[in-house]
Image (tube, rainbow, N blue to C red):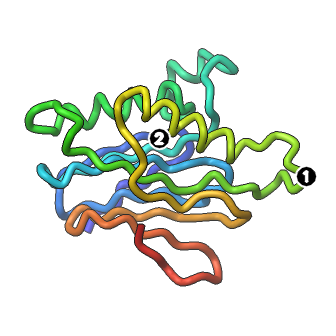
Amino acid sequence: MKTVLLGIGDIGISNDPEEILKTCALGSCVAVIILNPSVRAAAMAHIALPCSSTNIKKARLKPGYFADTGIPALLKLMNKVSSNGTRKNLFVKIVGGAQIMDKRNTFNIGKRNVLAIKKILWSYGLGVIAEDTGGDISRTVIVPLSTGKVIVSSPGLPEKYI
């Protein structure tokens, strides 16, 4: 199996059953996973911040870094592999949004990311069907295209499916 490894701000898509989408070390960052079972495709973005207005130049170079530019880019990619371009066959799952480095909740980046992502998805008529967010743990996400399942792992904890 070939692994498509996504770093911070990266966006990936596949409909190859021999591939795996993977992103590691999600702290306050959030992985947005869009699945289309009808064409056996998955797309994922590793989003770091809610709003691109903080760095428009970075948003142009790496739209997946921000929720407000990453989600539209992710949906555009998914439309390329979807048979009819409709969103009715799409399922969205999110992972991450933890409070790792900010124990006093000064910035609340994780929570702000999750809320921004949900708001943007809602504007596209999409809702999150499953999530593993919040807390104070780092997460890794794996999506094997052969199964379309979303596997979440964290140090010292058993793997789980969402």
Dot 2 corresponds to which residue?
10
Badge 2 element: loop
Instruction: Depth check: give the residue in front, 96 or 128.
Output: 128
Q: Which part of the image, by quadrant, shows the N terminus?
A: bottom left
Q: Position of residue 17 (x, y in %)?
A: 17, 62
Q: Is residue 82 left or right of residue 159?
A: left
- Discs 1/2, front: 1
In this picture, is 49 found above or below 39? above
Q: Position of residue 90 (x, y in %)?
A: 26, 45
Q: Which part of the image, by quadrant, shows the C terminus?
A: bottom left
Q: Position of residue 16 (x, y in %)?
A: 17, 55
Badge 1 element: loop
Outermost residue toward the left in this view? 83
Q: Is residue 104 left or right of residue 132?
A: right
Q: Is residue 154 left or right of residue 33?
A: right
Of the numbered discs in the image, which one, if any, rests on residue 118?
A: none
Dot 1 corresponds to which residue?
104
Q: Residue at x 43, y 55 (%)?
A: 5
Q: Residue at x 85, y 48 (%)?
A: 105
Amino acid type at mark 2: Asp
Of the two numbered discs 1 and 2 on the same chain, state the one appearing first in sequence: 2
Q: Residue at x 45, y 47 (%)?
A: 32
Instruction: Depth check: give the residue in front, 60 or 93.
Output: 93
As measured in the structure, the alpha-carbon distance from the residue carrying label 1 to the one carrying label 2 is 29 Å
Quadrant position of residue 59? top right
